[in-house]
Amino acid sequence: MADTIKIVELTEDRYNHWEEFCASCDEAWFWHTIAWLKYCAAYRDSRFETRNLSFLAIDETGILAICPLFLEKREDPDGQVRMEIGPAGSGGLTIVPAIRNEQSEDRREKICQVIFKQIDQLALKYQAVRATFRMSPLNLRPNRFNWLLKHGCLDNSVNTQIIDLSSPVDRLWSALRKGHKYDVHRGEKHYQIDIYGQSNPDKNAFEQYRLLHHKAAGRITRPTKTFEMMYDWLRSGNGILCSARKNGRYAGFSYIILYKDGAYYGSASDDPDFETDIPISHVIQWKVIQWLRDNGYKKYEIGQQQFNAQFLDIPTVKDLNLSLFKRGFGGETIPSYRGTKYYDKNFMETDLANNLSKLIAYYRT
């Protein structure tokens, strides 16, 4: 039966069918949508030369699965160029394929085999040295294990923090770390908090968020077009922007991505010139949690959890502190399954040797 499965390229005339599939598929989240694919493509600059290789797997019954896929150029510090599968706009990791609901395990396995055979062929065709994949814990169909290992990937998993928004507000509040509660109370007294969404979009506030994003980073990190897309998501119900102001001046923002019954902490920007001893992000995140619960969302992925160095993941001190901050809002730490597949043994040897050196250096310090 596997030989009846056909691969078709994602073209613009198939966008509507792709979107309909995302809406009905329990394994699809926002990372699978056309909106996100366009964002990843727009994120590119002359360094990446992003190419969309996304495709669908179909048979006589219709779409069986969708596979977002990007090819990008990478350049080492020494100027050596290589091709990789994985979008820069998604942290360099491609979301795994989404398979149609109500498929038997045997059928799912056959579909995945066809899909990864196609990925391998594309990698060889374009001389990609590596492909990186990730799963989303916000799927309606939970990821029970890292099935990427079945398809030749090395385990590159980390952890993430999920807040169950179906809990009563008092239980959500009690889950906050004591210091977080203190800082939320101070923030509520000090800042005016506003949340902008589909019902009340504010272009001026969003523009201030964009400008603060650049200011906090000290440079323009990505094209303006990507921010315009994020504003469109807000207007279409796929995002909210939460701001904190003092005396009319914006002190900080957080942007949250919305899809189906889940939410994802997308980005934050604080004004580095805003002088205050009252934390900004604590009250913003608590107000976001309340808003999400009040508006029917069930899960909030507040972000990646790193505790120490792993072979394929070396966190900075900033990464560890950010993880600690996010855990302070409660929730459950769960696996965030990821996988890396190499197509060039020389690159693999060099890459893994570099990772090993970094890991050893981390523990020496």
Image: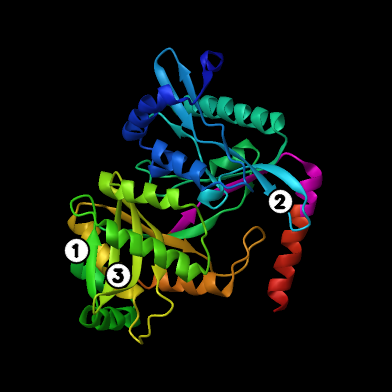
SS under mark 1? loop
Left or right, 125 with reference to 283: right
- The part of the chain drawn in magenta is 334-350
Question: Residues under labels 3 and 2: Cα distance?
Answer: 37 Å
Q: How is the image coloured?
A: rainbow
Q: Alpha-carbon neighbours of circle 3 within 10 Å: few (<14), some, or many (≥20)?
A: many
> Disc 3 or 2, which lies upstream in sequence?
2
Evaluate whether residue 331 shows in this view.
no
What amino acid is at disc 3?
Answer: Ile
- Identity, as a three-letter code, of the amino acid under mark 1: Pro
Instruction: Give the numbered dot on residue 75.
Output: 2
Residue 168 marker:
1
Instruction: Find residue 123 and report its image quarter.
Output: top right
Q: Is residue 349 magenta?
A: yes
Residue drawn at 59 percent across, 67 percent down: 315
> Residue 23: x and y, percent?
32, 34
Relative image position of residue 49 (x, y in whole percent): 62, 41
Residue 345 screen position, x and y as percent: 79, 43
Seen from the viewer's position, the closer of residues 323 and 232 is: 232
Q: Which residue is mark 3?
A: 284
Which secondary structure, mark 2? strand
Q: Is residue 146 left or right of residue 77?
A: left
Whole-angstrom CA distance, mark 3 to mark 1, is 19 Å
Quarter of the image with the C terminus is: bottom right
Q: Are marks 3 and 1 in contact (CB under 8 Å)?
A: no
SS class of the residue under badge 3?
A: helix
Residue at (74, 46) in percent of width and height: 81
